[in-house]
Amino acid sequence: MVRISIQIVRWIIPILLGLIVPLIIQEQSYILHLFILTFLYAFFAQSWNILMGFAGQASLGQALFFGMGSYTVGLLVLHLPHYFKGSNLIWLGIIIGGAIALLVGLAIGIITFRIRGPYFALATIASLEIVRLIFLYTENFTQGGIGIIIPHPPEITTPFFIIDFIEKMPHYYITFFMLLISCTIVYILSKSKYGLLFLSIKEDEDAASSLGVNSFRIRLLAMAISGFIAGIAGAYYAIYMGFIDPSFEPGGVLTLFTSVDAIIICLIGGIGTVPGPFIGALIKVMVGEYLRVSFGWKSGVDLVIFGALLIIFYLFVPKGISGSLSLIREKRPFKLKR
Amino acid sequence: MWKFFWGVCVMLSPTLLIASLIHGIILGCLYAVIAIGMNLIYGILGAKNIAHGDFVMLGMFAAYWLITLYNVNPFLMIPITFLIFLPIGFIYTRLIGKTLGDMTGSILVTFGLSTILMNMARIVWGADFRSPSVPSVIISFGFMSISNLYLLIFIVAIILTIALHIFLTKSKVGTAIRATGQDAEAASSLGINIRWIRTLTVGIAIGLAGVCGSLFVLIYYTHPYVGISVTLTALMMCVVGGLGSVKGAFIGSLIIGIAQNLSGAFIPFGLAPVVGFIIFLLILIVRPKGLFGV
C-alpha cells in the first residue's frame, strides 16, 4: 500500500506542478518558451531512450526521424498550400509526419537488420547524411538551403475562450501532454512483456534469438515506436519554430547535432529510466540557455563551458541523474542486496 | 538532364577519369592516415573518438600559423606538428581512458571535447576560412598534370602508412599494441605495461592527426568547424574496413576517397558524399562487420 502511494505521489506532484506553474508565470513568455523547448526535447529524447535504453540499438541517426517529421509538415505546407498553409489541417500533418518517420524507421530497420553495435551507429549516421544532402540539393522539391517557412496555425475559437497559437500557453500545454503521454508509454513498455523482450535483445541478441525471441521483429518494433515519437517531435518542432532548413549547423533539423542532443539529454538524465529524458532536457535547456545569456559577450564561450560540463558530468555522474538516484535508493538499509 | 549528359561525356573522357581517380587515391591515402589513427584508438580503448577531426583542425591551424608567421618549409612542418601533438595525445589519454569499453560514454566525452576545441578555435582565431599561401608547381605527365603539393601529400601519406604497418607488425612495441587491443588482461599478465601502451597509442594517433592536418592545409582551407566533417568521413572509412583493423582502414579510405572523387566528376559536387555513403551502406549490408572486421 505504501509503495503504491509513493508511486502515485511521484507521478502526481510533477503533473500538478506542470499544470499550475504556467498559470503563475504566464506573463513571462521567455521562460514559457524554455519550458516548451524542454518538454519537446524531452519528448524527442524519449524516442532515443526507447531505442537505446530499452532495445539497446545505439542509433546516431535519431535526427533522421526528427527531420522526416518536420520535413513532412514543411513539404505539405510547401506543395499543398491550399489545404495546409495556415489552416487547422496542419495538426493532421503532425500525425502524417509521425507515420512517415515510422515508415522510415521500418525501412532503416530492414536495411540494417544484420548490422549491430558501432556499425549500426555509423549506418544510421550514413542514412541521415544521405537524406540531408538529398534534401539540400533537390531545390525544386524542398527549396534546399533556403528552408521552408511554416506559418502559425490559425486560432481556435471556443464558446469560453480563444486559443491563439502565437501565444506560448497553448504550446506549453500541448508539449506538456505530449511528454506525459510519452512517459506513460515508456512506463507501460518497461512493465510489459515487450519491455522484457527489448531488454533481452539489448543484453544479448544471439542468446535471445536462440531462446525463441524473434529479434528482427522486436528490433523493427523498437525502431517503429522510436521513429513515430521522434517524427511527431520533429513535426511539432516545425510548427512551433516556424522554420526548417537542412544546413549542417547546430540547430538544423537533419543534422548529427540534433541526434547528439537526444543522446546528451538521455545520458545526463539516465539511460533506460522513465523520467531520465525530462530531467536531462530540463538541465540541458536551462543550463545551456543560462550560459548563453550570461556569457553572451563572446560567442562560443558558453559552448566551451557546456562541453566541459559534459565531460565533468560523465566523469562524476556516469549513470545519469535518474540512474544515480535509483542507485542511492537501492543502497538503503533493510533491502536485500543481490 | 544536360548535367547528367555532360557527366556521361566527362566519364567517357579518359583524362578526367584518370585525373579524378588519381586525386581520389591521393585524398584516400591522406584520409587513411587519419582513419588508421582513429582505428588504433578504437582498437585499444573501444572508444569512438569524435574529437579526432578537431585535432586535425588544430593541426591545420598550427601548420597555417607556422607557414604564415615563420615561413616554415612544408617538409619540415611534418616532424614539428608530430612533436607538438604527441604530448597532447599523451595528456588526452588521461581523459579518454576514463571511458574504457563504454562506447556511448566515449561519444559523450569526445563530443564534449570536440565542442570545446572547435569553439576555443573560434574564440581565439575567429570563424574565417583561411588558407596559407604555399607556392605550388604544376607537374605534367604528357596528357595530365598534377600539383606538386598533391604529390608531396601522396608520398608522405604512403610513407606514413607503410611505416605504421611495419611498426605495428614487426616491432616489439607494435606487437604489444596489437596484443593489448586483442585482450588487455592477457597482455598485462604477460608483462606488458598496458597503461603505457595505451598512452603511446593515443599519442601516436593524435600525432598523426596533427601531421594530417598540416598536410591537409596545403590543399584545403581551414576553419574552426572543419573537424566534424573530417571525423565523419574518417569514421565511415574505419567502419567500411572493419573497426580495429589497420589494413581495413587503408582499403576503406581508398574506396570512399575514389568513390567520392569519381562521382564528383559527374553529379553536382555537393552530392558527391551521397555516393560514398551509399557505397558504405551497401558494403555494410553485405558484410555487417566491414570488409576486414572480425
Image (cartoon, rainbow, N blue to C red):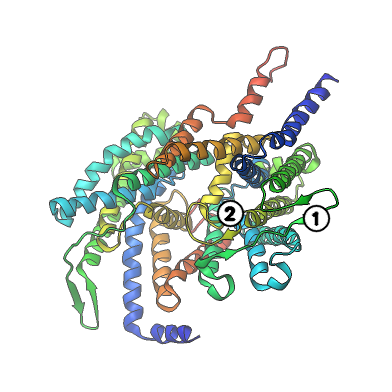
Residue placed most toward the observer, A195 or A4:
A4
Say which quadrant the C terminus of chain A sits in. Answer: top right
Dividing the picture into quarters, in which one does residue A38 lie? top right
* Residue at image point 66% right, 36% down: A25
Which element carries disc 1, helix, strand or loop? strand
Residue B289 point in image, percent of width and height: 53, 54
Residue B37 point in image, percent of width and height: 36, 48
Disc number for residue A63:
2
Circle nearer the N terminus (2, 1)? 2
Residue placed most toward the observer, B98 or B239:
B98
- Circles 2 and 1, Cβ within 8 Å, touching? The answer is no
Q: Which residue is mark 1?
A: A157
Which element carries disc 2, helix, strand or loop? helix
Determine crowd level at label 1: few under 14, some 14-19, many 20+ residues with C-alpha closer than 10 A.
few
* Residue at image point 53% right, 73% down: A139
The subunit carrying tag 2 is A
Q: Amino acid at mark 1?
A: Thr
In the image, taking residue A61 as reference, residue A176 lies left or right, namely right
Disc number for residue B241:
none
In the image, taking residue B29 as reference, residue B7 lies left or right, namely right
Say which quadrant the N terminus of chain A sits in. Answer: top right
Q: Is residue B177 visible?
A: yes
Residue B145 point in image, percent of width and height: 23, 77
